[in-house]
Amino acid sequence: MTNFLRGSCLGFLLCGFLAATHLHAQGVRIAVVDPERISREANTAGATRAKLQQEFAVREKNLIDQGTALKTLVDNYEREAPTLSEGQRATRQKQLADNDREFQQGRRRLQEDLDARTSEEMQRLMERANLVVKQVAETEKYDLVLQQAVYVNPKNDITSKVIQMLNAGAPK
């Protein structure tokens, strides 16, 4: 089985090499763009992060306040526990556990909502970037544009050009 997999991998590599050689022989122009770099370096990415931070600031502050209040309750309980009756200790422990569970759920909901909004905004950015990539490909007559590669000759990397066009206000 291992020899079969090795042979299959070798076959795929050989096919890829032959296809690349064939494309090169025909004068096919290929470019590569790095979407991760776009999401880090485009001005709109920074603006998006600031927008999301502002959008979630109130919820985050409320969660921080809730965590501070919970810590105060825990500290008070630990200080008063030796003087409480068994029933009072059990009641306070249950309240603390309920408060902690509510706090953890709030943290989880905030993180899930933030992740969802971040994904939405990055999707919009990448849609705009794809329009710019298409524009660059058509203008400079590229036959194929790939997203990321194991190795890219810098002359084939159009990421900087795409970022520059996005920053200049290309397709919105």
Image (spheres, rainbow, N blue to C red):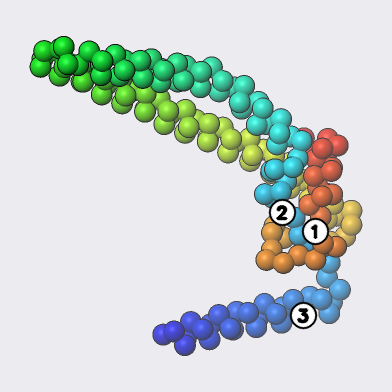
Report helix, strand or loop for mark 2.
Answer: loop
Residue type of the residue flagged with mark 2: Asp
Look at the image and tell me whether residue 143 can be seen. no
Q: Position of residue 116 (x, y in %)?
A: 53, 35
Q: Position of residue 64 (x, y in %)?
A: 46, 20
Q: Are marks 2 and 1 in contact (CB under 8 Å)?
A: yes
Residue located beneath label 3 in the image: 21
Q: Quadrant of the N terminus?
A: bottom left
> Eyeballing the image, is 138 above or below 98?
below
Residue type of the residue flagged with mark 3: Thr
Q: Are marks 3 and 1 in contact (CB under 8 Å)?
A: no
User: Hey, which residue is sitting farthest left in the picture?
Assistant: 86
> Eyeballing the image, is 24 above or below 112?
below
| Residue at the image point whose x is 56% and y is 20% from the top | 57
> Eyeballing the image, is 128 above or below 20?
above
Comparing labels 2 and 3, the label whose residue is closer to the camera? 2
Give how far apart the Cα atoms at labels 2 and 1 are: 8 Å
Residue type of the residue flagged with mark 1: Asp
Of labels 3 and 1, earlier in sequence is 3
Residue located beneath label 2 in the image: 34
Count of number-bearing discs: 3
| Residue at the image point whose x is 15% and y is 12% from the top | 84
Residue 121 appears left or right of 90? right
Q: Position of residue 100 (x, y in %)?
A: 32, 24
Look at the image and tell me whether residue 38 can be seen. yes
Residue located beneath label 1 in the image: 157
| Residue at the image point whose x is 58% and y is 83% from the top | 10
Report helix, strand or loop for mark 3.
Answer: helix
